[in-house]
Image (cartoon, grey):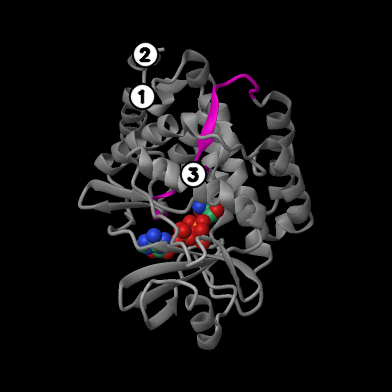
């Protein structure tokens, strides 16, 4: 998270007066993350997280992911739960933004995920996909293939300021993916942003998942592709095939990938890389003045995209096709 919107002590006190979460002892902005404004609240009843939703989260989307967190928790997926105010509402308005308070989750996100943690996230992702099967709400993914060109148009003119040739590279990839994006793969509820900073561990045991504002209905294997990108590359940008194998095998144990999903995985991974390249590029070129945020590196995702362009089949991800039952 980050802090884009400042919250004054008196307006926070007024907001909290509608909740039974104890007396406010202190609060501070959380610098981590890039999407929303987040504060750690310390009250006489413990710690809570206050989130003010920023540009990529519309107020009308809140019921989807707040209900999803309750639905998943009821099915054994540990994730934070929104606090209700005395009127029973989970969402309010603070400093002009939609605002939600959630409980604090114990654990630490892995700065350098190890193989066991990659397996842990693969298993948790599959369990989340299964738990989402009977979730009754629907939300289209605004950041799937049809959402990429509008993002590109926001950044195209200045893309070459970041790297010469970047505009042409993205344009060619976008044309390619728009022309062959799969339409028939199994869909369901996806997290859509399950990066290491959204997965908490206590030692190597996964303790919970956070940050659901991007959750939506989309291709389930696309969520796997997002995780391959986020978890299986090293700091020097080399692909770690052992981590990929661990993640894919663990996912497959709970929700076996079909042959069609396996065949599509390199393409889905290219799409996932392009999605994060584009949002990072737009954000990098448009840091709001005064915001407490460290924009993420778009070029990291150019390297990942180039890697997936070179992938021919699942064996390049460390898995013989016969190793994952269809
Ligand atoms: N329920 C929670 N319990 C404990 N810490 C939390 C919780 N929610 C958020 N945090 C802390 O705030 C940080 C940022 O949260 P989060 O990832 O949800 O923000 P974001 O702006 O949506 O970030 P991004 O989308 O870039 O991952 C987390 O890495 C964690 O340190
Ligand atoms: N996880 C995203 C930021 C939140 O969308 C990234 O690393 O680009």
Q: From mark 1 to mark 2, how far is it between C-alphas?
A: 8 Å
Q: Is residue 147 above or below residue 265?
A: below
- At horizontal 36% and vertical 35% (from top left) the residue drawn is 122
Crowding near the residue tagged with mark 1, few <14, some 14–19, many ≥20 C-alpha atoms within 10 Å: some
Q: Is residue 256 above or below residue 211?
A: above
* Image quarter hosting the C terminus: top left
Q: Quadrant of residue 46?
A: bottom left
Crowding near the residue tagged with mark 2, few <14, some 14–19, many ≥20 C-alpha atoms within 10 Å: few
Instruction: Return the disc, 3 or 1, that comes first in the chain's sequence.
Output: 3
Residue 86: percent from left, percent from top: 47, 67
- At horizontal 37% and vertical 81% (from top left) the residue drawn is 23
Instruction: Magenta stretch: give its range.
Output: 182-197
Q: Which residue is mark 2?
A: 325
- At horizontal 49% and vertical 42% (from top left) the residue drawn is 191
Q: Are marks 1 and 2 in contact (CB under 8 Å)?
A: yes
Prevailing secondary structure class for the magenta stretch in the rendered image: loop
Residue 125: percent from left, percent from top: 40, 36
Secondary structure, mark 3, is helix
Q: From mark 2 to mark 3, how far is it between C-alphas?
A: 29 Å
Does the beta carbon at disc 1 come under 8 Å from ligand 2? Answer: no
Q: Quadrant of residue 228?
A: top left
Left/right placement of residue 320 relative to residue 64 reads left
Q: Which residue is mark 1?
A: 252
Left/right placement of residue 192 relative to residue 111 reads right
Judging depth in this view, the residue of 126 and 47 nearest the camera is: 47
Q: Is residue 184 magenta?
A: yes
Q: Which residue is mark 3?
A: 68
Instruction: Return the disc, 2 or 3, that comes first in the chain's sequence.
Output: 3
Residue 291: percent from left, percent from top: 59, 75
Instruction: Return the disc, 1 or 2, that comes first in the chain's sequence.
Output: 1
Q: From mark 3 to mark 1, how far is it between C-alphas?
A: 23 Å
Q: Is residue 205 above or below residue 265?
A: below
């Amino acid at each position: 998270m980050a802090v884009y919107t400042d919250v004054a002590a008196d307006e926070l006190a007024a907001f909290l007066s509608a909740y039974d979460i104890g007396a406010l002892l202190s609060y501070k902005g959380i610098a981590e993350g890039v999407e929303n404004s987040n504060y750690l609240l310390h009250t006489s009843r413990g710690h809570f997280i206050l989130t003010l939703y920023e540009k990529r989260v519309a107020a009308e989307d809140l019921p989807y992911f707040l209900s999803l967190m309750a639905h998943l928790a009821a099915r054994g997926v540990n994730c934070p739960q929104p606090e209700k105010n005395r009127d029973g509402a989970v969402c309010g308005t603070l400093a002009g933004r939609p605002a939600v308070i959630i409980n604090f989750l114990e654990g630490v996100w892995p700065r350098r995920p190890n193989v066991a943690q990659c397996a842990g996230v693969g298993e948790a992702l599959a369990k989340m996909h299964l738990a989402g099967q009977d979730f009754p709400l629907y939300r289209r993914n605004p950041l799937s293939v049809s959402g990429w060109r509008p993002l590109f148009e926001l950044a195209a003119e200045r893309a070459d300021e970041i790297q010469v040739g970047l505009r042409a590279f993205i344009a060619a990839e976008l044309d390619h993916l728009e022309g062959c994006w799969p339409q028939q793969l199994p869909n369901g509820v996806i997290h859509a942003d399950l990066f290491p900073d959204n997965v908490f561990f206590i030692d190597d045991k996964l303790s919970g998942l956070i940050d659901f504002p991007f959750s939506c209905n989309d291709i389930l294997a696309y969520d796997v592709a997002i995780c391959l990108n986020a978890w299986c590359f090293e700091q020097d940008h080399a692909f770690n095939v052992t981590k990929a194998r661990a993640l894919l095998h663990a996912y497959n144990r709970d929700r076996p990938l079909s042959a069609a999903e396996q065949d599509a995985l390199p393409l889905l991974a290219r799409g996932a890389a392009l999605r994060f390249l584009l949002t990072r590029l737009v954000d990098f070129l448009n840091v709001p003045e005064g915001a407490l945020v460290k924009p993420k590196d778009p070029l990291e995702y150019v390297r990942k995209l180039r890697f997936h362009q070179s992938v021919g089949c699942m064996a390049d991800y460390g898995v013989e096709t016969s190793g994952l039952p269809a």
